[in-house]
Amino acid sequence: MRSWVKTAFCLGMVMQAGVAEANTSLSSAPTMAPRPVLRPQGAEASAAVQMAAATQVDSAVRAAVAETASAALATPTEVAANKRFEAWVQGFQGRARAQGISQSVLNAAFRGVTYDPEVIKRDRNQSEFTKTIWEYLDSAASDKRVSNGGDALRQHRRTLEQIEKAYGVDKEVVVAVWGLESSYGTYRGSMDVVRSLATLAFDGRRGSFFEQQLIAALKILQAGDVDPRHMTGSWAGAMGHTQFIPTSYLAFAVDFTGDGKRDIWSDNPTDALASTAAYLKRSGWVKGQPWGVEVVLPRGFNYTLANRKIQKSPADWAQLGVRGVDGRAVPNYGAGAILLPAGGQGAAFMVFKNFAVIERYNAADAYVIGVGHLSDRLKGGAKIQGDWPRGDRALTFAERKELQERLTRAGYSTQGVDGRIGPMTINAIRAYQGAKGLLPDGYPSLSLLKRLR
């Protein structure tokens, strides 16, 4: 799901899912409806009625006290924000009706929904998230996650084989997505999606995007796939076992069980897993092609060739000395590019079209490698053989912005200062490294920043 929301959320999920992995009881239990109380008879009736009335009064008092305490704890800023939020909801409902959402759906969706300051807090703090590629992969393909993935494959083998047959996507890849997104269903998110999306849309920092997601969520409710209070997910609105954002759900979710609902929220993961396979298939998945292969670069390799836009056949790369970790030329899986996620001091990969397909689900290289490597491990493959520069640490958000500023001032423009290391920043780093006689691998290291200082 190519969006900054999905990328940020999924990177954070690996940290959270590591905790969930250790506790397999985190999946939510089904909500039980209250059973009718038998009408008492005779002399017992009066006492029972009095007790019931007292219980009702006591419950009402407790609820009132709790509501008063909650209001007292809210800051004046939050109270003011909630009043503005309520006014925003009224205006939004008019826009939603204009897009075909019925008033009854709006009433049900927004019943009891208030402004959520915790969502805004998480949104503001996400840019500070920093983790090196090797730290991420240590968690993404940990022995525990591989073991749990094997259990999931065995438990759902028949369903997964049917899904693989229907969509042509490796069952291990589908399970790897499941593992990274929710630790195989143990951490699906419990926040009210309508509340989260409405809060983010009202906030305005990405208002149009989140309003689009909120409209999509309301369309899901209107279709009857789920009711408002069971539409739960992350603070950013990613939902279910494999964390679909609402627009992606509308585009790709499928009813694989045939029960009339595309259910990605319940304990049964079938529809979620099939929907993930459908997403990848419709994004261009090539059956029989790996996401990538770990390779060894020759001494004196021209690091400017390590560019996603430069693609060659495995045979052509072999002529340049690029080979698999087994010392042989990589099989002919189609055109591939060389990826160096930690620069010249880390592991190297030859990546193929399916890398870009997984990237459609989440645009972060770390995530794609995580899914790919975990799926390889689930197939019985080895751990990554190359070393990582484990003595390094990731740059903070402020340091990434500083790096861009200093490169630009030195005459190597990054075409903007936003703290995001994209192609323009990598090209600027390469140009600087080449001019200074350094290895032009485009890697934004702390040592590079210190040199610029």
Image (cartoon, grey):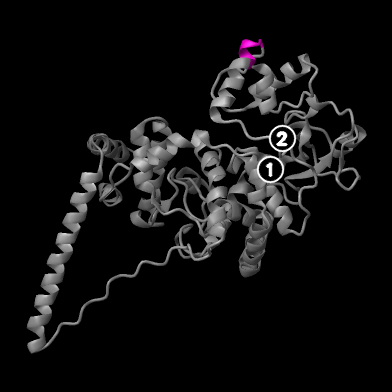
Tell me where residue 422 appears, x and y as whole percent.
62, 27
**Secondary structure under the numbered disc 2 in the rendered image:** loop
Label drawn at residue 342: 2
Earlier-in-chain disc, 1 versus 2: 1
**Secondary structure under the numbered disc 1 in the rendered image:** helix
Task: Please say whether residue 227 is visible from this viewpoint.
Answer: no
Residues under labels 1 and 2: Cα distance?
8 Å
In the image, residue 115 sits, relative to residue 171, either above or below, namely above
Residue at image point 63% right, 57% down: 175
Residue positioned most to the bottom: 42
Name the residue beneath numbered marker 1.
134
Closest to the observer, 290 or 421: 421
Of the 4 image quadrants, the one containing the N terminus is: top right
Q: Which residues are magenta?
A: 407-411
Closest to the observer, 8 or 435: 435
Q: Is residue 11 left or right of residue 64?
A: right
Task: Choose top left, top right, bottom left or bottom right for residue 158.
Answer: bottom right
Residue at image point 63% right, 40% down: 359
Tell me where residue 356 appears, x and y as whole percent.
67, 39
Q: Residues within 10 Å of mark 2 (few under 14, many from 20)?
A: many
Task: Please say whether residue 347 is visible from this viewpoint.
Answer: yes
Task: Choose top left, top right, bottom left or bottom right for residue 341.
Answer: top right
Of the 4 image quadrants, the one containing the C terminus is: top right
